[in-house]
Amino acid sequence: MLQFPKDFLWGTATSSYQIEGANKTDGKGPSIWDAFCQIPGKISNNENGDTACDHYHKVVEDVQMMKALNIKAYRFSISWPRILPDGKVTKINEKGIDFYNHLIDTLLKNEITPWVTLYHWDLPLALQLEYDGWTGEKISDLFADYADLCFSRFGDRVKNWITINEPWVVAILGYGQGVFAPGRISNIEPYVAGHQLLLAHAKAVQVFRTKYQPTQGGQIGITNNCDWREPASDSDADKKAATRALEFFLGWFADPIYKGDYPKCMKERLGERLPAFTPEEKTMLLHSSDFFGLNHYTTMYAAEASGNLGKTNTYGNGGMSEDQDVILSSDPKWEYTSMRWAVVPWGCRKLLQWIANRYDNPPIYITENGCSYNDNLENGICADEKRTAFFKGYLTECNAAIQQGVNLKGYFIWSLMDNFEWASGYSKRFGIHYVDFETLERTPKDSARWYAELIANQ
Ligand code: PNW
């Protein structure tokens, strides 16, 4: 059995749009995902999050499920349009506030610490229409106002805050490839949106640090996602290509926070397509995270492209490949999940070490790690041995990273239960609880039992 430090934080994660349902209930306003799901062909099977797991009506049952898992922390997100139907603090939906109060209080009663994400992609639709979403210049102030409201209403009990989940995904998949809401396709807008997301994060942190942290305590940070990029060969060119790929992936959002500006290679290669920070903005961003939130799923090889990018590589899974001049590939011998993401546990350790080296060994929380497989429920049993093997593999490498001095402090499984997997609809199951989307019944998979036992034995 793996042994972790005594104070290591064990958790699971979810997000509002993916599990809550109740999308038109109790005064909630529409989000960009409600609208995006209505466009035929955008979501597998043309599904949507209208009902999802109906978590909105199943809080007590779902917290009992967490209790049985022995988890110490639960990461969830607040739906901005559920508490602010048109996105602005001039109209507060008290029923939405009540829902999160009920969830937070139920968690605390069961000794589970809430970790709250303020933005997990469900932007109020009104702000998309009125301000052009994350490309608009007003959005960062509106986000800070929304964050302020959340700190004031929930901060007496919530001590762990994540401003934004995966700005890379918002920028690249939402504004570059158009496969996530709001469905835009551009090679300029991702960098504009990324810029506004960073400013929104910094402004929310400033509000927290000036108005709340001095009296309420607590910590705040941002969660970034990054795959590992392994050099495809020992050549200098491929090693540089892999570093460049990581700088375009994670450095894009972490360098401004830990070093005060975008990576040099991004500035050189993007020129005017990359907005610049003012000196005041740089100061506001620097050290604006109390911890390093990391979502990690997979690994690919990176090679120098030297301008020879094939057509299929234009929008590779590492961002805008033509901007990086990197060719990504993978090893057919690796194990693959049903998302076709490769299972490469050692990539997780290498990424943790890269972060520790580049950013001066910050406290790191893995706020998501997990896998989707085509699970079946038979006679109440879901024998998902591949998922358990995935977690064993990744946690073994996390453990090795800690032994080598990486300051990894916690780990959240994605996800507590099967849910609405964005463009893949309900076809991809990431949960450690099986959800029957007809009856909404939840059943622990074998991996959930394994996780509960692992935590109990620490
Ligand atoms: C994350 N990619 O999304 C999200 O935080 C979750 O909401 C989601 O369910 C989970 O991972 C599984 O997908 C990602 O293309 C979506 O690199 C796409 C990518 C990465 C993360």
Image: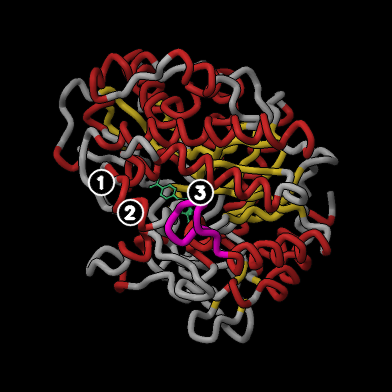
User: Which three-letter amino acid code belongs to the residue tagged 2?
Assistant: Phe
441 left or right of 451 in image = left
6 left or right of 310 in image = right
User: Which three-letter amino acid code belongs to the residue tagged 1?
Assistant: Gln
Mark 2 residue CB less than 8 A from any atom of ligand 1: yes
- The CA distance from mark 3 to mark 2 is 15 Å
Q: Residue at x 29, y 24 (%)?
A: 274
- The CA distance from mark 2 to mark 1 is 8 Å
Classify 10 Å Cα crowding around label 1: few (below 14), some (14-19), many (20 and above): many
| Residue 364 coordinates in the image, percent (x, y) | 65, 33
| Residue 31 coordinates in the image, percent (x, y) | 40, 60
Q: Is residue 77 above or below residue 318?
A: below
- Asked if residue 417 can be seen in this view, the reply is yes
User: Which of 447/71 is in front?
Assistant: 71
Q: Residue at x 69, y 64 (%)?
A: 103
| Residue 41 coordinates in the image, percent (x, y) | 23, 67
User: Which of 51/206 is in front?
Assistant: 206
Image quarter of residue 428: bottom left
| Residue 11 coordinates in the image, percent (x, y) | 70, 52
User: Which three-letter amino acid code belongs to the residue tagged 3?
Assistant: Tyr
Q: Residue at x 21, y 40 (%)?
A: 186
Residue on which the image places disc 3: 119
Foreground label between 1 and 3: 3
- The CA distance from mark 1 to mark 3 is 20 Å
Q: Which residues are magenta?
A: 84-93
* Secondary element at image label 1: loop
**Lower sequence index among marks 1 and 3:** 3
Residue on which the image places disc 1: 177
Mark 2–mark 1 CB contact (< 8 Å): yes
Residue on which the image places disc 2: 180
